């Protein structure tokens, strides 16, 4: 029986507050189902050379955490991961700045992860590496002699070669991805963008008719695995949270007004500045809504040491202040803008309370808030989802009101349409989306990826068996 080993930059330790984002939810779901090992950074920075990983075992899952040195964290996480790869992969060249020291630190941390992981590996492990922080890890593991199936899943978008080749070591990045046996993406767009890079580097003949990639004597399986949510848990959390103190007080404070909710990590890719302008446009164009709608935007701070994040925070403070200053009254504030996080269940209760969920990233790998909004609704009286057509989730949630997030006027007009949508249409759109969510839920995502790794394992065992019999 094989064991699943997941590796990610940040891990979610039991009893600590959950790490943000879909990655943590997805990995935890996979490991709780199968048991196994989760290896990654524990979230602490240290001054001395980090020692052996700390191990915690809980409910069949072993959590192995390593520390990062302050300087490594600065160069590898704040630097290369979040000022080079993140903006580049989200098509934000303006926020990208390349620096060789940061690239070196990125390599060093990946090498260190491989070294610390190796002694924990067992002969029958299936190894699943997550996200852009750890692209070279597969190469370091291979160099250290690991022959077990290696998978990589990218949680964020993958850029087309014309964007990717802005990165000086783009060829190394593509080659590193070919060290894995299975490479997974959120959407077909990302897969096609990966093929564009493979074709550029290895020629069109590297992509076989069945979509697999041949590089030298290796065959790599590249596929789409859209990440989903745990529909039943989200529904239950949302229903229960409706009677929680936070959600009840928020609901009472609306005094019968309609509610629009957004929940996003504070990140320039989430399109919050554009969303605030769209809302302002909406209040100007449809003044009958002034005093009748409340927009609750929850935006927990993230990556606060990175300049682009400091700038976007200031821009949002100005934008929300501007709208509130202009439209607020003594008993009403148009935007409630909060830079804090809430427990997941509370967030689900807030989403369920909303007449409109607004998810308008300028680019997003998937966006699980969009999916959670749908899962959290009361099917008898569901709210309406306004969703960016530049989020990966738009491919599956085609019954949402899809918008171009840059077109702030159109988003404002869509908000007006959402607020006046009749119940039968709301129900119909919601039912279609819920059905998709159930089919492609979080368990299906991890099961499909693990099955792909198991197939690699089975194929390699067959090759070994034939080799031994001749
Ligand atoms: O999904 C993208 C991602 O960067 C994940 O890798 C990460 O877990 C999440 O967003 C939150 O980001 P960070 O760890 O930088 O706070």
Image (cartoon, rainbow, N blue to C red):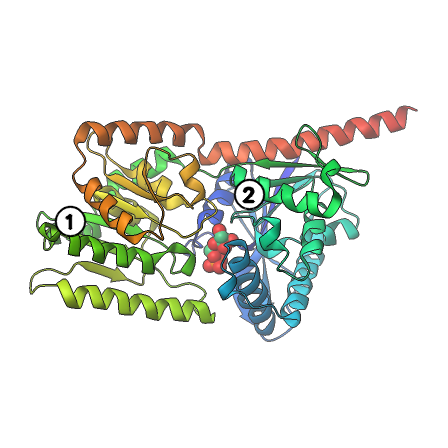
Picture coordinates of residue 364, whole percent (x, y)? 45, 49
- Residue occupying the far right of the picture: 470
Query: 39 or 211, which lies in front?
Result: 211
Crowd tier of the residue under label 1, counting other residues whose Cα lies within 10 Å: few below 14, some 14–19, many 20 or above: some
- Quarter of the figure that contains the C terminus: top right
295 displayed left or right of 28: left
Residue 190 is tagged as 2
The residue under the point 61% across, 31% down is 451
Q: Is residue 237 visible?
A: yes
The disc, 1 or 2, on the residue closer to the chain's N-terminal end is 2
Picture coordinates of residue 270, whole percent (x, y)? 39, 55
Query: 418 or 163, which lies in front?
Result: 163
Q: Which residue is mark 1?
A: 251
Crowd tier of the residue under label 2, counting other residues whose Cα lies within 10 Å: few below 14, some 14–19, many 20 or above: many
266 displayed left or right of 467: left
123 displayed left or right of 263: right
Helix, strand or loop under label 1: helix
């Amino acid at each position: 029986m094989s064991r699943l080993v997941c590796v990610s930059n940040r891990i979610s330790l039991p009893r600590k507050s959950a790490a943000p984002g879909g990655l943590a939810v997805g990995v935890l779901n996979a490991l709780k189902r199968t048991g196994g090992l989760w290896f990654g950074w524990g979230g602490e920075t240290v001054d001395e050379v980090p020692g052996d990983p700390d191990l915690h075992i809980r409910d069949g899952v072993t959590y192995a955490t390593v520390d990062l040195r302050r300087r490594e964290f600065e160069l590898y996480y704040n630097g290369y991961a979040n000022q080079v790869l993140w903006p580049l992969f989200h098509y934000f060249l303006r926020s990208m700045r390349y620096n060789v020291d940061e690239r070196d630190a990125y390599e060093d941390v990946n090498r260190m992860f491989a070294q610390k992981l190796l002694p924990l590996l067992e002969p029958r492990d299936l190894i699943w590496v997550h996200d852009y922080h750890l692209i070279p890890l597969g190469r370091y593991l291979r160099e250290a002699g690991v022959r077990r199936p290696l998978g990589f899943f990218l949680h964020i978008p993958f850029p087309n070669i014309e964007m990717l080749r802005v990165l000086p070591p783009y060829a190394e990045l593509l080659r590193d991805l070919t060290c894995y046996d299975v490479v997974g993406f959120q959407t077909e767009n990302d897969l096609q963008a990966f093929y564009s890079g493979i074709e550029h580097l290895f020629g069109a003949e590297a992509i076989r008719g069945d979509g697999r990639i041949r590089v030298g004597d290796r065959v790599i399986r590249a596929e789409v695995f859209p990440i989903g949510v745990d529909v039943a848990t989200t529904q239950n959390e949302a229903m229960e949270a409706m009677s929680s103190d936070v959600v009840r007080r928020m609901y009472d404070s609306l005094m019968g007004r309609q509610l629009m909710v957004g929940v996003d990590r504070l990140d320039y890719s989430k399109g919050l500045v554009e969303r605030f302008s769209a809302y302002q446009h909406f209040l100007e164009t449809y003044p009958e809504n002034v005093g009748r709608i409340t927009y609750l935007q929850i935006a927990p701070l993230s990556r606060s040491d990175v300049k682009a994040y400091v700038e976007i925070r200031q821009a949002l403070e100005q934008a929300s202040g501007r709208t509130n200053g202009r439209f607020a009254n003594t008993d009403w504030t148009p935007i409630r803008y909060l830079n804090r996080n809430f427990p997941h269940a509370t967030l689900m209760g807030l989403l369920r309370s909303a007449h409109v969920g607004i998810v308008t990233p300028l680019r997003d790998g998937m966006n699980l808030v969009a999916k959670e909004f749908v899962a959290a609704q009361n099917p008898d009286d569901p709210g309406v989802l306004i969703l960016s057509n530049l989020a990966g989730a738009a491919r599956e949630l085609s019954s949402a009101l899809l918008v171009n997030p840059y077109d702030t006027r159109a988003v404002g007009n869509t908000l007006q349409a959402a607020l006046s949508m009749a119940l039968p249409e709301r129900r119909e759109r919601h039912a279609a989306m819920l059905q998709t969510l159930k089919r492609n839920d979080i368990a299906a995502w991890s099961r499909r990826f693990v099955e792909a790794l198991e197939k690699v394992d089975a194929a390699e065992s067959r090759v070994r068996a034939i080799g031994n019999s001749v």
